[in-house]
Image: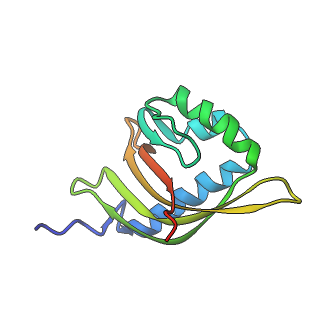
Amino acid sequence: MEKKPETTEGGREARELATELFKLWNETLKLVDEEKMAEFYLENCIFLPTLSDKFVTNKEGVKEYFKHFLEKKPVAEIVEDMAVYSKSGNELSHCGMYNFEVGSEDSRTIVEARFTYIWQKDERGDWKILHHHSSLLPKK
């Protein structure tokens, strides 16, 4: 099996870039703006959201999901993760476990979930989400 490159983007480690992209995504949640959240996703993205039974396949669906999800005032924290570049260096896979704190200020709860983001460079060379799957962590 051929080893995937660990560095690209001028030698940056895959996990370093994944952490940076996730931080931007997470900080944008705080803006409570579904349009801004949709900017992270490619037009033909695939999105299986954490707290929805919808299969989202475009930016309009992303906006619709975040319109309601952002009402919960989510803040995410990665618990464990790993990342790897594709052979071409134009895709970055980032997966792991994260917790979302959601709810009103006086009643916050933790949602434990697992995630996969596949970031891909768009035609301008910007990293956008091609695939995002987030699901509740199964109970033992």
Q: Quadrant of the N terminus?
A: bottom left
Q: Position of residue 116 (x, y in %)?
A: 42, 55
Residue extending farthest to the front is: 140
Dividing the picture into quarters, in which one does residue 85 lie?
Answer: bottom left
* Residue occupying image coordinates x 89% and y 60%: 106
Q: Position of residue 103 (x, y in %)?
A: 78, 53
Figure check: 139 above or below 58: below
Q: Report how many numbered discs are placed on residues in the image.
A: 0
Viewer-side residue, 92 vs 69: 69
Q: Report the coloring of the rendering.
A: rainbow
Viewer-side residue, 111 vs 18: 111
Residue extending farthest to the top is: 60
Q: Position of residue 54 (x, y in %)?
A: 50, 35
Figure check: 47 above or below 73: above
Q: Is residue 10 left or right of residue 97?
A: left
* Residue occupying image coordinates x 31% and y 50%: 90
Q: Is residue 80 left or right of residue 68?
A: left
Please indicate, yes or no, whether residue 32 appears anywhere in the rendered image. yes
Please indicate, yes or no, whether residue 126 appears anywhere in the rendered image. no
Figure check: 79 above or below 90: below
Q: Position of residue 13 (x, y in %)?
A: 38, 70
Viewer-side residue, 60 vs 39: 60
Residue extending farthest to the left is: 1
* Residue occupying image coordinates x 64% and y 38%: 66
Viewer-side residue, 126 vs 136: 136
